[in-house]
Structures are given as structure tokens and as C-alpha cells.
């Protein structure tokens, strides 16, 4: 199935892949990523690396980063040591992604469809609303199709995409009114990620899109700079947004993934054995983090309710689907995400459903 999907996309993506690969040849040659903390990757000395995350120590990205750091140390018997820098201490998601691109940061875990589309626009396919109904559908499409399909795009940006981790299904919260159907979103100012698909979603549902850095969001909600935000349950709870929000709508408009990305020059500079450890640690961290996040969500939702947030658990999902049905065909979106890619992801979902 993967080969068939890739062939279906080959014509649409070949030109951009060619251009990107040409760009990568220039970037990688000039990029001196600091693997670096060692006197050479294969010489037996310790390789040190930084992992940047924007969430706090309980956030999904940091859970995955720490799992990777622990596993790579174990697999390498201490030859590779990774230090996690949470709480945006190395910058915003955009700054962390730029750092990986340039080589000043070896690795980061950031929202796949947040700042990353500035480098790989196709990641915005994950922002197309209502493509997945279950996490299992999302895992199948991510791990068995998109991971391989997008690899050349990331490499063209001097990035090695190691794995897709989990944020979870995204839901709306706000301080103004209960949202039970799509039309209730009209007029609300909602913090969104800085990407064109989110602006298109705002237009489709009638709310006002306001990009704000994640580490500034709590204060923005507290000071009513915006009415609300949209994030997965675990992000809402771990970041204490339920302390400064009154209403929550479990519409699950998109499944949010996180991309574990490493500077390509750093990765290629490792020995074959070290690269194997990195690959193993990435898959381990992905699976560990997905289970950890899923295990947390039920308890977190109950905690959100206990904090007084009014939760609409069964909104009129069809009204949301109807309002956003043609979003992926809009000119502003097709300029970034080929509709063929959206259809290919849906084909992967259909394949999973047929198993």
C-alpha cells in the first residue's frame, strides 16, 4: 500500500523534492552541528546533544524527549548523552526548529503542524479537520505512510525526522460561552498555531485566529488577551489552562502529532552503530510517550471537570464537519498541501479500517 500511495504522489511532489534536495546539498555541507561536544563521533569519546522542548516537565513533548534521552544513554552505554531543555528555555517552537535546521540545537520535539510547516509545508496535512476518528487510525497513517513519505522533505531542510509522537485530539476551550455546534464559534478570539491551515479553519468556523507562543498562552488567557485556545486534553491539563478557562468542547477537530527531528548533519556525522541507537531510541520514545499520554487523558479530563470547567462531551460534530468539508481544497491550502496528499492519508486510514 505504501508503494502505491507513494507512486500516486510522485508526480505531484517530484519537482519540490528535486528543488529541496538541491537545497539540502548546500545546507548540510556548511552546517557544523555540535556533536560537537565530543572530539569526533566515532572516536570513543562522549557525544553530547541538546533536546529542546517548549512544554513543561509534564508536557507531552518533554515526556518523549526524556524517554529518548534515557534510552539513548542506555543503548549507547553512555557514549551518547542527551540533555533535555524544557519550558522554551532554548526558544519557541519556531526558534527550536530553526536551531535544528541550522545545527545550533541537535534535536527538538515540536508540533508537527505548528511552526514546522515553515520548513515542510506538507506537515499541515495533519491540520485538515476530521481525518481521523481514532488514535489507531492516526498511528497507522503516521507510521506506515507519512513517516516515509515526508522524509525527503525534512532532509531537504537539513532535518532528520525520527518519529511522530503524540499530542492527541485537539479541542476548543474558551471563557465566553458554551460551544455545542460549529456556529457557536463565531466571534470568539482563539489562540492558534502560526500556520495557514489554522487561519483557514478560523475562517471556516467564524472565529478570530490569534497566534501566541505556547509558553505565553497561560498569561494571555488569564489576562483575556484571547477568549480561548485549542489543544489536546493533556496539554490543557498539564499547562493548567483549565484554571483560566470556563468552557470546553470535545470536538476533536484534528489529531495533533509531534515531530521528533534531529539536525541531519549531526545524524549523518554519527557512526552507523550510533545512528542505529538513535533510531531505536526514537521508536522507543514514540511508543512509550503515546501510551503515557493515552493513560493520562481520562484522569486529566476528570480533573478539568473538577476545576469547574463546563465540558460539552457530545457536540454536533456533523456541523463542524460540514463547515470545514472543503477546507483542504481552498487555494491557500492547496498551495501548501497537495490535495493528493490529503487523499493519500485518507486512503491509509481506509486501509487500516479494512484490516
Image: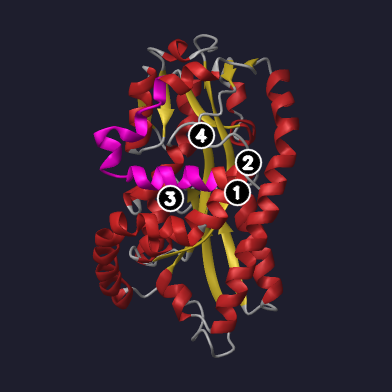
Along the line of sight, the residue nearer the viewer: 71 or 257: 257
Of badges 2 and 3, nearer the viewer stands 2
Q: Residues within 10 Å of mark 4 (few under 14, many from 20)?
A: many
Rounded to the nearest angstrom, the CA distance separating label 2 from label 1 is 6 Å
Which mark sits nearer the N-terminus, 2 or 4? 2
Res. 278 in view: yes
Rounded to the nearest angstrom, the CA distance separating label 2 from label 4 is 11 Å
Which mark sits nearer the N-terminus, 3 or 4? 3
Rounded to the nearest angstrom, the CA distance separating label 3 from label 4 is 25 Å
Q: Tag 1's secondary structure?
A: helix
Position of residue 321 in the picture relative to residue 305 (left or right): left
Q: Residues within 10 Å of mark 2 (few under 14, many from 20)?
A: some
Residue underneath mark 3: 91
- The answer to if 210 sits in the magenta stretch is no
- The answer to if 348 sits in the magenta stretch is yes
Of badges 3 and 1, nearer the viewer stands 1
Label pair 2/1, CB-CB below 8 angstroms: yes
Picture residue at 36% right of the left edge, 17% below the top: 206
Residue underneath mark 2: 135
Magenta-highlighted residues: 323-349
Name above or below for residue 154 compared with residue 132: below
Res. 34 in view: no
Label pair 4/1, CB-CB below 8 angstroms: no
Residue 294 screen position, x and y as percent: 70, 41
Rounded to the nearest angstrom, the CA distance separating label 4 from label 1 is 13 Å
Question: Residue 254 has which mark?
Answer: 4
Amino acid at each position: 500500500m505504501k508503494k502505491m500511495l507513494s507512486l500516486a504522489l510522485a508526480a505531484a511532489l517530484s519537482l519540490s523534492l528535486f528543488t529541496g534536495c538541491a537545497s539540502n546539498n548546500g545546507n548540510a555541507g556548511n552546517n557544523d552541528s555540535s556533536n560537537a561536544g565530543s572530539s569526533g563521533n566515532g572516536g570513543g569519546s562522549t557525544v553530547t546533544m541538546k533536546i529542546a522542548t517548549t512544554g513543561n516537565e509534564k508536557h507531552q513533548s518533554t515526556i518523549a524527549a526524556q524517554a529518548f534521552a534515557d534510552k539513548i544513554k542506555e543503548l549507547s552505554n553512555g557514549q551518547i548523552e542527551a540533555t533535555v531543555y524544557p519550558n522554551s528555555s532554548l526558544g519557541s517552537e519556531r526558534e527550536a526548529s530553526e536551531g535544528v535546521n541550522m545545527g545550533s540545537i541537535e534535536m527538538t520535539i515540536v508540533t508537527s503542524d505548528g511552526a514546522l510547516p515553515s520548513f515542510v509545508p506538507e506537515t499541515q496535512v495533519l491540520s485538515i479537520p476530521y481525518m481521523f476518528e481514532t488514535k489507531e487510525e492516526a498511528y497507522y497513517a503516521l507510521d506506515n505512510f507519512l513517516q516515509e513519505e515526508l522524509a525527503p522533505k525534512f532532509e531537504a531542510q537539513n532535518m532528520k525526522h525520527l518519529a511522530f509522537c503524540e499530542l492527541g485530539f485537539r479541542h476548543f476551550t474558551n471563557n465566553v460561552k458554551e460551544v455545542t455546534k460549529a456556529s457557536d464559534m463565531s466571534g470568539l478570539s482563539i489562540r492558534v498555531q502560526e500556520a495557514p491551515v489554522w487561519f483557514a479553519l478560523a475562517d471556516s468556523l467564524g472565529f478570530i485566529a490569534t497566534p501566541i507562543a505556547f509558553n505565553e498562552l497561560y498569561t494571555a488567557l488569564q489576562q483575556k488577551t484571547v477568549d480561548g485556545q485549542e489543544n489536546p486534553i493533556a496539554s490543557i491539563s498539564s499547562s493548567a489552562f483549565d484554571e483560566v478557562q470556563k468552557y470546553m468542547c470535545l470536538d476533536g477537530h484534528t489529531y495533533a502529532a509531534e515531530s521528533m527531528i534531529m539536525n541531519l548533519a549531526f545524524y549523518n556525522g554519527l557512526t552507523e552503530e550510533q545512528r542505529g541507537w538513535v533510531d531505536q531510541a526514537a521508536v522507543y520514545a514514540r511508543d512509550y510517550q503515546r501510551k503515557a499520554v493515552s493513560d493520562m487523558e481520562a484522569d486529566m479530563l476528570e480533573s478539568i471537570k473538577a476545576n469547574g470547567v463546563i465540558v460539552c462531551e457530545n457536540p454536533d460534530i456533523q456541523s463542524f464537519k460540514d463547515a470545514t468539508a472543503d477546507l483542504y481544497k481552498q487555494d491557500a491550502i492547496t498551495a501548501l498541501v497537495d490535495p493528493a496528499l490529503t487523499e493519500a492519508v485518507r486512503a491509509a486510514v481506509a486501509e487500516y479500517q479494512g484490516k
